[in-house]
Amino acid sequence: MKKIFNIVLVIFALVCVLLLGASFAVKVYLSNSRLRAMIIPPVEKALGRTVEIGQINVSLFSGVQVYDFVIKEANGLDDFISSTRFVVDYKVVPLLQGKFVINEVHFVDPSIHILRAEDGVFNFQSLVALAKKKQSVEQGEKDPSAADKSPLPFSVAVEQFVIENGMVSVRDELGILPETDIITNSEIQLGVGHSLSDYYYNGEIRFIVDTLYRDVNLHNEGRVTFDETRCDYTADIVIDEQNLQIAGSVDNYKSRYPPLIFNLYSAELDVDRLLQSLTQLGKTTDTSAGSDGVPGKTAKSKTADAAIIPPELNVHGEVLLKKVKVKDLVVEDLKLQFGLEDAQLSLADLGGRTLGGEISGEVAADLQGEPSYNGKLAAQAFQLGAIQKAYLPHSPAVMTGSVSGAVAFQGRGTDPEVIKKRLKATGEYSLQDGRISGSDVTRGLAAVLNMQELNDVPIKNMDGRFEVEKGKVRFNGSTDSVWFKAKAVGTIGLNGDLHVPVAMALSPRLSQQLDRRLEAAQYMEKQNGRTIVHLNIDGSVNKPRVSLDVQKTGKQAADKVIDTLLKDGSEEEKAAGEAVKSVLDNLFGQ
């Protein structure tokens, strides 16, 4: 046993001597000066740029370490690519098994500076390797960078590929591309088998992006995790102090139109301000570059005649906004589920709180060709005062009450005038326990009937149904107030025009007052002690006008005069009177 132990000990000592000798030989042969002479000239020739390396250390056991690596710009002064330290740490034993296993590839403080000059040329376009590749492709030669399908003599595995404080900066002297700085930290695992088609990778990339473009600041912090078939992402985005969070995933992302999950969240969002920033970003300039990067040369749009949305695009997700402002409307806890597949857009589970009440609904749209859409929306317990404050802030009227309603709609087109003509809808509405005071309509009622009481109208209930077609809203509604009961069957144009005939049955108290204040009241119809007043509301939504319905009021007066004159007449006289009333019916259009 002792003899065997001695043999093992000798063998171990010999292996150690060989490894130490090999390590010493590697250090002697691959000295810093020799490595610099081996690496720098061919790299400079391939790139056409000056290359600087501070120090290179090679060890049989600890791998390769390169310090202060720099590729200069074409002027030989500024840095194009640089890194303070580059480390390749590999395992020795797997080499004996035909495997090249790298413990870690580590870049410390790598940076890339991308610049487009005033002539429209990027700083990387002058690299010799890229210029030769472009020339070869133009001449129909095989791309030298194409993957070689021949078997490799060994497999390669990188257990950890690390980028520490990586930096990419983009500058454009033409002012077209946004001024962008990217900081990234990444950890990636990858490997290649005995064929380049046999590979795997996975990892995580964390990034910070700061962009300044057209006086709009954009800050983005996020993370992407990925493997060969899927990536998941999250990002916090700030656009001019507007905060958004996005999260989602992409399956089979190598395909042209991979399925995409996109979720949007925000604690507080001003849509108008956000759209203003995005519009500012989207503005074009006279110095816009074409596809070849030359200023003033604009490529012809390939999507001019294409469908608005590619049918292959597949996107699903949710939107959750704690507080969102659109114009003067504030919506809280806005939520919806959306999907886009086969150019069919769906918005489901739409909900939120606004104007003191709640909204809900669903919408579907066909985006192939000219868009068409349909949906259902409902409003529950909106406060009329809140609606007035949002949309009629300068109105002297005072309006209160709880408004509810529902509408089902369908339409086609995107132009506002086309939408007005093609929109169809049906719905219903109600107002409970409300009051309308000092409005143009109530003031008009008070003036026409000489009753100031009607300038302040308490409403027990107002409800009705409506339909929208050919640019007009036709409705049939009723109102129950302590002052009157009214029915209206009229139209409101989507352009704001009004034509609303109203039949109003005044309360017994107001009926008695009307008889004393308005001479024409004696000719008006009476039902159960209530005077029936026929009115017209026309003009526009912004400037409504209230007037007596002269035709119906005149017809009522004529009928009453005839009935009074013929009260004690003969049968022949009464028959003649009915004939006259029939003629009047035709004249007044009843």
Image (cartoon, grey):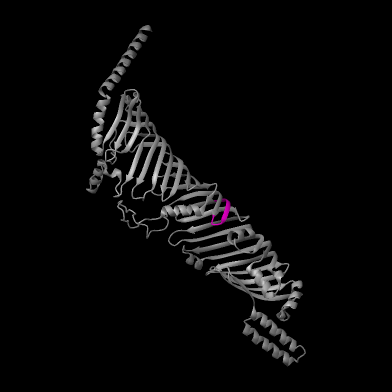
Q: Is residue 542 magenta?
A: no
Q: Is residue 532 left or right of residue 108?
A: right
The span picked out in magenta is 326-335
Q: Is residue 327 magenta?
A: yes
163 or 413: which is nearer to us?
163
- Any part of residue 36 in sight: yes
Instruction: Compare residues 67 and 194 and report the one nearer the observer.
Output: 67
Residue 505, given in percent of the width and then of the height, sits at 71, 73
Dominant SS in magenta = strand
Question: Is 301 drawn above or below residue 89 in the view shown?
Answer: below
Q: Considering only vertical position in the picture, is 564 above or below 336? A: below
**Which residue is more in the foreground, 286 or 524?**
286
Q: Residue furthest top?
A: 2
* Quarter of the view holding residue 6: top left
Please tell me which residue is depicted at 34% across the width and 41% down the height of the picture: 113
**Percent of width and height locating residue 482:** 73, 67
Image quadrant containing the C terminus = bottom right
Query: Image quarter for residue 96?
Result: top left
Tell me, yes or no, if residue 144 can be seen here.
Answer: no
Is residue 514 left or right of 75 when viewed as pictured? right
Q: As displayed, is residue 383 above or below residue 85?
A: below
Does 20 sit left or right of 459 as displayed? left
- Quarter of the figure that contains the N terminus: top left
Q: Specify the quadrant of the image occupied by residue 452.
A: bottom right
